[in-house]
Structure formats: C-alpha cells, structure tokens
Image (tube, grey):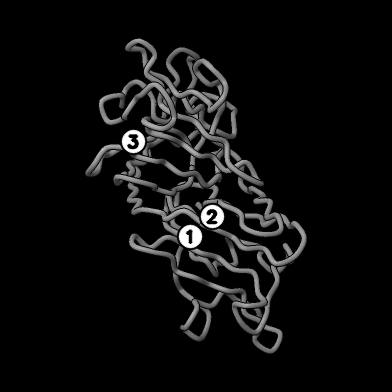
Amino acid sequence: MKKMMTVLAACAVTSLALADSGVVSQNIVGYQTVNVNSGFNMFSLNWVEIGTANDAIAISNLFGSAQDASLTAGANAGVSDMLQVWNGTGYEGYFYKNNAGTHYWQKVGVPGATADSVPTSAGFWFLRRASGTTNLTISAQVRAISTFGHVMENGFNAFGVSFPVTVAINDAASWDWDAAGVTAGANAGVSDMLQVWNGTGYEGYFYKNNAGTHYWQKVGVPGATTDTIPLGAGVWFMRRSTAITVTQTKTF
C-alpha cells in the first residue's frame, strides 16, 4: 500500500443563481482547498460537478487549466503529476500531459485528453512531482440526493464521505454499518476495519462485537470511538467477507 501524505481541506457554501436558465438553484455550491505535498497524497471527492446531474467531476475540471501553474506537465507518466483513481477493484492512471505546450490530463495508454471522471465518494491518489507543497482547489456542488451506497468489495476499498462534511465514524444517523452487514468481531484480526489518514499516518478502527453490541473501536483504545472521518480524507475499508453496500445519509 502506497504511503499517503497530508491532506488538508476547507470548504465554504453559498447559493447558486443560474442566470442562463432564469431560475434560482437549490443546490449548494462551494470549494475544497487541498494542500498537496511532494510525493503521494490520498484524498476523496465529496462533491459533484457544478451545473450537471453527474455523480462525478470530470478530471479535466477537477484540477485543470486554471491551476496549470501548480501542476507539473510532462511527456509521459514518469515525469508528470499523476492521478490514480480507484474504480472499485483497482486504479485508473492519468498523467498531466505536455503536448507541445498544451497541457491536459491523459489516461495512461490512451492518447489525447481524457473525458473520464472521478466518481463522487471515490478515494484517489495525487502524485506530485515537484518539491514542497501547493494548494489545489476543487469548485463543485453538493449532491442533490439524500443517501448514497458505498459498495465494499472483499479486501481493501478506497472511499470517502459522500457529502462535503466531517462525519463521526459511529454516527448512527449517517451510517448503516449493522444493517449493511459489516463484520463485527472481538478484535482487529477478525473484524472489518477502517484506516483513516490523520495527517502523518493512519488511524485504525475495527468493528467491535461487545456481547452483541456493535461499534467502531479505535485500535488500542477500548470503547466506541468518537473520532471522525474529516472532509476530503481518503479512507480504506477492509472487508473480511463478501461484498456489501454501506449507505451514508446526508444529515444537513
């Protein structure tokens, strides 16, 4: 598993007036600013693209021409900034292509500017080639839906919260862990697990079965955790058994 670097996120929300349609949208729009370090950074997408019904954001609009000066473009994937997007079972790779001075995201092995998107709630990696840090901003809107199902396959799954908000891991109003069939056990060796980036490493949690009562417990800290999954954080869900769907409910 690749090392994940620090991710910092902030957001602001406001009403959006769609002047060209003559109506006022009820959608909530805003932005998320991510502090990207040199090397690998893992985070998640908690928004959808502004003005569309897509449950995703096009890669060309995620970190595109407006932030060109903050990105490293090159002839191939070995020298360019890269995205690695989780597709449910593995990664799709993209690099920031320099084509005779024109820059765009290109899928590895597929010439030309990609039309692919990053799905909302997906976990993904950003590989920064340059030294130091830079800030990248995602402008987007909140999903109109009130619930979203995260499919958790057997093994490791990269994901994030479905809406732009920090969520308590044990918040029963937000998650249906038990109803989804998450595997609870006596210890981390037999239970489903979460690994959440804390800025310098992972915080590990296992789904505890305490005499029939189930909750997420932090490894080494007895009792139900009060920790959260921060906005923008990439998370690993380690599923012990067959695939399940974990539903998150929007609570704002």
Residue annotated with mark 1: 167
Circle 2 sits on which residue?
Answer: 251
| In-image side of 92 versus 65 (left or right) | right
Please state which amino acid type lies under the numbered disc 2. Answer: Thr
**Above or below, comparing residue 162 to residue 202 in the picture:** above
**What whole-number distance in Å separates the C-alpha atoms at marks 1 and 3?**
21 Å
Q: CA distance from mark 2 to mark 3?
A: 25 Å
Please, what secondary structure does the residue beneath circle 2 have?
Answer: loop
**Is residue 15 among the parts visible in the rendering?**
no
Which residue bears the numbered disc 3?
A: 137
Foreground pick, 84 / 218: 84
Crowding around mark 3 (Cα neighbors within 10 Å: few <14, some 14 to 19, many 20+) is some
How far apart, in angstroms, are the residues tagged by discs 1 and 2?
A: 9 Å
- Determine contact: label 1, label 2, CB under 8 Å: yes
Residue 242's label in the rendered image is none
Q: Position of residue 147 (x, y in %)?
A: 63, 48
What amino acid is found at the position of numbered circle 3 in the picture?
Answer: Thr
Dot 1 amino acid type = Val
Which element type, helix, strand or loop, lies under badge 3? strand
